[in-house]
Amino acid sequence: MTDLEAALRRAVRGEVGFDVTSRALTTMDASNYRRVPLGVVAPADADDVAAVLEVCRERGVPVVARGGGTSIAGQATGTGVVLDFTRHMNRLVGLDPQARTAVVQPGLVLDRLQDAAAPHGLRFGPDPSTHSRCTLGGMIGNNSCGSHSVAWGTTADSVLELSVVTARGRRLRLGQQWAGAPQGLRELVDGDLARLRTGFLDLPRRISGYALDALLPENGADVARSFCGSEGTLGVLTEAVVRLVESPRARALAVLGYADEAGAAEAAAGLLPLGPLTVEGMAVDLVPSTEGLPRGGAWLFVETGGDTEAEARARAEAVVRAADVVDALVVTDPAGQRTLWRIREDASGTATRMPDGSEAWPGWEDCAVPPARLGGYLRDFRSLLAAHGLRGTPYGHFGDGCIHVRIDFDLLTDAGVARFRRFSEELADVVVAHGGSLSGEHGDGQARAELLPRMYGAETVALFERAKAVWDPDDLLNPGMLVRPAPLDTNLRFSVLPREPVDVAFGYPSDGGDFSAAVRRCVGVAKCRTTSVSGSGVMCPSFRVTGEEEHSTRGRARLLHEMLAGELVTDGWRSTEVRDALDLCLSCKGCRSDCPVEVDMATYKAEFLHHHYEGRRRPAAHYAMGWLPVWLRWAARTRTAPVVNALASVRPLAAVAKRLGGIAGEREVPRLAGETFSRWWRGRRRGAAGDGDLVVLWPDTFTEHLSPSVGRAAVRVLEAAGLRVALPPTLRSRGVIGDGTSTSALALLTARRGQVCCGLTYVSTGQLDRARTVMRRTLDLMAPVLETSAPVVVLEPSCAAALRTDLPELLHDDPRAARLASRVLTFAEALERHAPDWTPPAVNLPAVGQTHCHQHAVLGDAADRRLRESAGLTGELSGGCCGLAGNFGFEAGHYEVSAACAEDQLLPAVREAPDGAVVLADGFSCRTQLEQLAGVRGRHLAEVLAEGLEGERR
């Protein structure tokens, strides 16, 4: 233990982390930059903050305050001690509805404040797109704004008082009329009044530099306001009194379509006199699909408010009439508005990928110009991009003249970094020429601080340095930011990554086969750190349970980044730090769809486990559950399922078996079916064959051995819809035809018996060599099916997802894998595509349950929704993950997290279900979790429809 660490542990009551994991998790924010801290402290209160500053000041160690870690300019990174306020100093201290104020701690997430204010008809005005995870302290440090700034301004406009601790330990209460001003600040202002009155732009989004003009007497000598946007360089915030605003009772959203981006930009300023709440803009090159949007090549999202829906709609329609548009759409339905806003909010992540899949990066994320000059600025900006051979997709706050953009800089080579610098210098000049600010929302950090003299001039920047010296004479707080900045092309986070591709098992087709590029996908916007699920969302269940960065998708990606870098995590694939962080990853694949840049941590986990245990003994659970298809087939062939069930019911024997198999003692071992689905199929009495399309029904391991009732129900429904059902071949021979039962004599003599398997259990436990063997054998068996046009219907969502994604990505060198993946349909998709005229039975019951996480992330559930609606199954299924997640919830040490995940969404939804509701759970894991934790029987949609058919028959 170092002297610094020991001193901090003696001085503070909060956590002190100088271990590899704690440091690795805070090397980066959401920017291009990386710094390795000495350690991390999660202070318990303001006394802890003062104690940390005292210890660090005595040793000359820098201190960096960090909130959600979503800063995009590098200001949330540092080489000294990082203060993490999200763990303890995250409370809403008080809320006064009459005064419309709230008292908050710096680690409070914005959405928690909004949730508390909403019942009173109030809200905090600024709302960055990261509102579900950014903290009030970070917002004050960066003077954040968000989409509603045209109505309610920046964070500084909403701050009344701030409690801060200076680097030398003074506790100040900042406010107007010089309240809390450190000694020497008033003299500094009085000595340079002329510069302060003429050297600062009158611009709504002027965030760059220090807001020293707020200290002018005509501006109320507002010390609190001047502190906003100082990026942790002047003092450490411990509490804030903020102003709340009245929230409109109703809102409408007018989406205005324009021919191009310039047309939208030029129109934005003209809409401001109508008093909109937002005027947001984005162009078509940022939108994956224009479905649901009006015609056009660019759009303005203009929100209006009112006391009633009719009043809000009338104002939105007035905006449409005033706008010269190609097409327009007015939406008053809250769900429809959320869907449209999600497109805009995810832009900070989706913009990191160009349409062709190449990478794009922040760095010039949020320049701002006067709104009336935005069209001209964008044209000059596009011209500069073209001159440098760069591409970017601008979007953002058009009503405030503030543009976000990610640019496809090459930050991996010396030549690319040199071009990054030249472009940055030239763009700074363009912004200044248009009367703009280098930062319009997220602060200067390392990305822009070096260029502040181009905006303010050398003398004003020297004034900034003098102000910093008044507050922090020892340069202890976040050095290298705003004043005396580090060069913008140093400390780049990519410089430490390997230049040659890493040898991996998966193909990573979206990343050119490069695992480093896959890990680079995480840009740190931290959508995985949200504490509540939106709609059918899933990501990230383990973070919502633990609240620990280590167990978020971003945290795991950071550790993988450091593993590749080899500086902090030095033992590569053998790293215990990475293994431990991945241990609570449920492999739910939620991040594959919910993360704006589609980080696929389930695949990265499987890759890591493959290398981590290569040539070594694995955990017992990997053998017990990874090889589950083998054990179940063995029990079926020897017809010992009754014996296994009987032994499992003897508690002492079951306890020993679970301990030997690495299975959680709290879990009950699922019962094996007395008759497998395939055996039932072979012995069933076949009725008249339909004349519809042939579909091949996949007998996945769970349907085959554990819940054959699902398979039987599916056959009943598919045949009732007029489809011809067949099972995959079980003999590897070209003589086998699609129904898996007819062979030639020669084929019987030469064939080898087998059973199809998606390889899911081997993939989820990282046994990728075995998975490839199983998958290739499956492709051999499926060869005759692939020569037909028959679809493959998979009832278990996790198996369907494995066939759609894991199969072609793991066997990227076998073209048959992609062909089989393209044939895979869910139960609902098969009915919709191959029996479009069939009408399901009228069940007419409310339905509850949870959309399977793999279905949400990989397969999509649109067809399921339509099928449920057609059958009269009403109600929405919840999001999240059931928590069992295949082998995860059965593994020893995972039970508590597994159960907590179920309590997040699934179990409350089931408890609150109306009488007679159908509990839908298409996944075997989901049904098992419901049975073991709630005593509730969940059913596959096929079972519900089959029962409906039986009812109609009776």
Image (spheres, grey):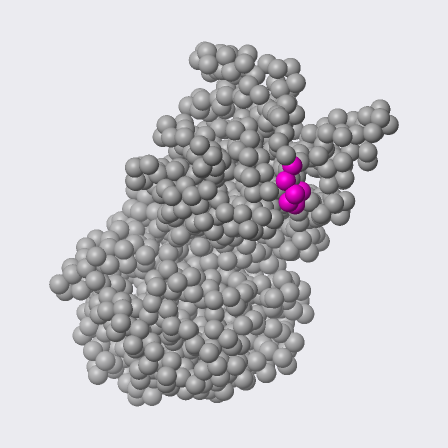
Say if the magenta span includes residue 776.
Answer: no
The image quadrant that residue 281 belongs to is: bottom left
Whether residue 208 is visible here, answered yes or no, is: no
Left/right of residue 342 with respect to residue 681 in the rendered view: left
**Is residue 748 shown left or right of residue 224?**
right
For residue 150, which quarter of the picture?
A: bottom left
Q: Is residue 948 placed above or below 335 in the rendered structure?
A: above
**Residue 938 screen position, x and y as percent:** 42, 33
Quarter the N terminus occupies: top left
The residue under the point 33% across, 76% down is 316
Q: Left of 745 or right of it: where is 931?
A: left
* Residue occupying the point 37% across, 27% down: 935
Residue 737 visible? The answer is: yes
Which residue shows up at 42% across the image and 23% down it? 666
Q: Could you tell me residue 404's position as x and y percent?
A: 47, 71
Residue depicted at x 51% and y 12%: 647
Question: For the view shown, which residue lies furthest in the right direction?
Answer: 746
The image position of residue 696, as x and y in percent, is: 66, 39
Closer to the camera in the image, 601 or 471: 601
Magenta-colored segment: predominant secondary structure: loop
From what the image shows, is residue 559 above or below residue 492? above
Query: In the image as oriented, which residue stretches furthest toward the left?
Result: 98
Determine if the magenta segment contains residue 692.
yes
Q: Is residue 533 above or below residue 664?
A: below
Q: Which residues are magenta?
A: 689-695
Quadrant where the C terminus sits is top left
Front-most of 5 and 541?
Answer: 541
Residue 319 figure quarter: bottom left
Q: Position of residue 501 (x, y in %)?
A: 70, 52
Query: Count of labels shown?
Result: 0
